[in-house]
Image: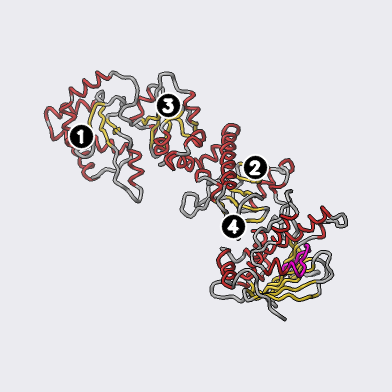
Amino acid sequence: MEKIQFQAESKRLLEMMINSIYSQKEVFLRELISNASDAIDKIYYKTLTDENLNFNKEDYYIKIVPNKENRTLTIIDTGIGMTKEELETNLGIIAKSGSLAFKTENEIKDGHDIIGQFGVGFYAAFMAADVVTVISKALGSEQAFKWESEGADGYTIVPCEKDGVGTEIILKIKENNEEDTYDDYLEEYRLKSIIKKYSDFIRYPIKMDMTSNRLKEGSDNEYEEYTEEQIINSMVPIWRKNKSELTDDDYTAFYNEKHYGFDKPLKHIHISVDGTIRYNAILYIPEKIPFDYYSKEFEKGLELYSNGVLIMNKCSDLLPDYFSFVKGMVDSEDLSLNISREILQHDRQLKLIAKNINKKIKSELQSLLKNDREKYEIFYQSFGRGLKFGVYNDFGMHKDVLQDLLMFYSSTEKKLVTLDEYVSRMPEDQKYIYYAAGVSNERIAKLPQAELVAEKGYEILYFTDDIDEFAIKMLMSYKEKEFKSVSSADLGIDSNEESQDEINNENKDLFDFMKNILEGKVKEVRASKRLKSHPVCLSSDGEVTIEMEKVLSTMPDNQNIKADKVLEINIQHDVFHSLKTAFENDKDKLKLYTNLLYNQALLIEGLPIQDPIEFTNDICKVMV
């Protein structure tokens, strides 16, 4: 029996395809099942033009038969089969796709599309098999043929017997080695998991005999094994069903079945687009944050299918980072894939799908915010930090997309509010959107710096996330209203500036003396316009606030960036009179008071005291 050499390429090319094109060996089964599905599709298309043929879908299936004893795995289909010439053409020439040729010749345009494009998927079988045997009988043919190959050295074709039209592919599975456990491809439940993962939505039933246990008849505790043929795949994907046929429970069941999360999704989004590019998608907004969401280990992305076949577990290009919490899948017939069907060519189709999905997610979140505030707040507690990081990231490129989704706790409403709600309530004389930053709402509410703003009746937004101020600095303004920290040097609230300047001038020597005592710690000491009942506070000049300094100091690449701090003194407080008296009569006591007030201001801000022992000794000195 003469061995025929492969016509197109060398042993080196076949070895490269087997070892390099596919990232995971298990995809060989996906490729062979996809080819089997194509073979059945071809009969379907033949029936459209041949009145002598009928297509009864119940007669068509794919069957997987593992045999541990013989170390064989057989993939059987009831498709169109291949003649001797087609075996030579389709399997004898590497990268010759019979499916692509059939698709072109028959001008296939409807949604019943054929999967195969490149003609290399069949050769993935050699990743798991030493010998590949193909027995095929073509539709309308009396004679079957057997094609067999051990790899790049060539193949043989001989006549054989076969009942019925279709193809059987018999893989002689390799022996285990140090790197791979090929026995897995002979295990029923491993095969089932691979089929469910990649080929669950092939439109024809994929059958396999599954072994289970049951109680022996007449026995209470003795079990016996039995084998039963099961259909492994779901066949009709949920995303191809009419939305009117589906309930919330159906979407939740799909969410759980695909292990998108262990919670119950807050909202599902079902998209069907049939335009410039055709695609279906089912997206979910989870209720709870994944345990690794804010870690380097978290991988964003949607499952990507091409015509019902899983191509990528996590296609990160379909989601921007700020919507990385979204789970789900996308299925399209129009994607440009590489020859392994594993890697996307980054083309305009993918970008268009991603752009549309991005708009849809934002629209659905806005709808949730407007129509189901309670659910939106549950979502925001889990994922709001990511939205705020999205505003800050990429130099604020996405701030216009995200600003209307942001929420912050309000000093007056005592709940989360949007920026739009805040601005809509602003009095006419209010120039800025005021905010205060701290570790908790309770701590912020007691900040001395907020006294003047609160006295004016202005609403204050509370920032408790470390990203908040950085995001707002990038946002800069909302609806032409700038953001202003209650700790800023200039609050923009009308006051008697001349009177304030006079007070600072009158007490210039006192304040300069205190500044010298705190040399290197504060930029300035001055009379406060904002304090009403508290004796002292720290404010900041410049873009870096005290809260931002605290966040930056915790970062690994800490650049030792400091806020320009100003020590503000309440001249209406009794403490100020003590300072003046000490300045006139006892400079040592003034030094003691100054250090105490500075450390007191640090404690109010939640900043560490440089020398706690000295601080406690200073308190004792005041007490005696």
| Real-space CA distance between mark 3 and mark 2, rounded to the nearest whole angstrom | 40 Å
Q: Amino acid at mark 1?
A: Thr
Farthest residue, direction front: 7
Asked if marks 1 and 2 touch (Cβ < 8 Å), the reply is: no
Asked if marks 2 and 4 touch (Cβ < 8 Å), the reply is: no
For image coordinates 23% across by 42% down, the residue present is 616
Asked if marks 1 and 3 touch (Cβ < 8 Å), the reply is: no
Q: Amino acid at mark 3?
A: Lys
Q: Position of residue 333 (x, y in %)?
A: 66, 50
Q: Which residue is mark 3?
A: 481
Q: Which residues are magenta?
A: 74-86
Q: Nearer the viewer, residue 341 or 175?
A: 341
Element at label 2 = loop
Q: Position of residue 222 (x, y in %)?
A: 74, 71
- Quadrant of the image occupied by residue 179: bottom right
Bin the neighbour count of mark 4 within 10 Å (Cα to Cα): few under 14, some 14-19, many 20 and up.
few
Q: Is residue 322 left or right of residue 116?
A: left
Q: Which residue is mark 4?
A: 338
Can residue 610 be seen at all in this image of the molecule? Answer: yes
Bin the neighbour count of mark 1 within 10 Å (Cα to Cα): few under 14, some 14-19, many 20 and up.
many
Q: Which residue is mark 2?
A: 276
